[in-house]
Image (cartoon, rainbow, N blue to C red):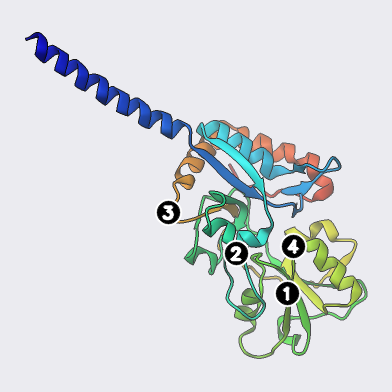
Amino acid sequence: MDGGRIVFLAVAVAVFGSLTSAQDTCAKKTYTIAVGHDFGAHEYIDNTGYLAGFHLELIDAVCTEAGMDCRTVWDKYSNCWAVTAGQPAHGGMGLFGKWYDACTGWYKTVGRVQVFSFARPHTKAPLSAFYIKNGGTSVTVSTLTGKTIGFVEGWASDEACVRRQQGSSTSFTAKNVPTPTDMVAQLKSGAIDAGFASVHDMAPYASEVTKVTGGEFSCMLSGSSMMTRKDNDFISKWEAGLDKLISSGKFKKICDAASIHSSRGSIDCVNG
């Protein structure tokens, strides 16, 4: 009888120990999240040299609500999603290579949804448009023949989106640049005839370049969200935190408070 009790106790301790070990392992999971540095009020480098913006505040709030241990990692955008002029866009080596669990603030597009998974969007999807230097010659989708058009490398308003609108009627040379700031510089120097980007991305540069009016169209399937590999459990945990943030009213407060970044642009949050 006593021997049976000892065996039972030993088994119980072993099982409990295994469960505790599994819980400890789960609790120690750290999620790494990539952010960039040139996305208007969403993410930028402040005067002290540190990353700032709405995305940093959103990540902190959602991870707190979800009970997730999150760490942000700066990386260039092309390591989340990469593109070469004239070639199909593809997943970046950072996300594919598991350097981090998710990339922040990426729009769901026709191309991306066939490669990665996306969380529920936290901002609305903007339209995209052509931009020219102040006083430059206007362009439309049907008047691009022989011109050099700039695109921000890897972003949703890309060469493929323009060609879907354009069909095979004209041809143009695509030139990729790292950031919107670089696109503005290339427009001013005449290195590109026009640039193509979302109206939201180019809002901070409204006085430096001219938006071609009347030709806007959408390149996104939904607003910006978290983009991750399809074998990752990040989205289920992130959305649980986002749901709590929205239902508590904290999400709206964070969106309203983002006005402190207004010198960098605006944040168009989803209704929550």
The disc at residue 199 is 4
Residue identified by numbered label 3: 231
Disc 1 versus disc 2: distance between alpha carbons? Answer: 16 Å
Residue 112 falls in which quadrant of the image?
bottom right
Vertical arrangement, residue 187 with respect to residue 79, above or below: below
Marks 1,3: beta carbons within 8 A: no
Name the N-terminal-most of marks 1 and 4.
4
Between 43 and 41, the residue placed more toward the observer is 43
Query: In the image, is residue 218 above or below residue 167?
Result: above
Q: Position of residue 177 (x, y in %)?
A: 76, 69
Q: Circles 3 and 2: CB distance less than 8 Å?
A: no
As helix, strand or loop, the secondary structure at mark 2 comes to: loop
Residue type for callout 1: Gly
Q: Which mark is residue 215?
A: 1
Of the two numbered discs 1 and 2 on the same chain, state the one appearing first in sequence.
Answer: 1
* Numbered badge on residue 220: 2
What is the distance, in whole Å, between disc 3 and disc 4 at their CAs? 33 Å
Report the residue at 84% width, 47% height from top. Answer: 263
Q: Given this view, does label 3 or label 2 mark the residue nearer the observer?
A: 3
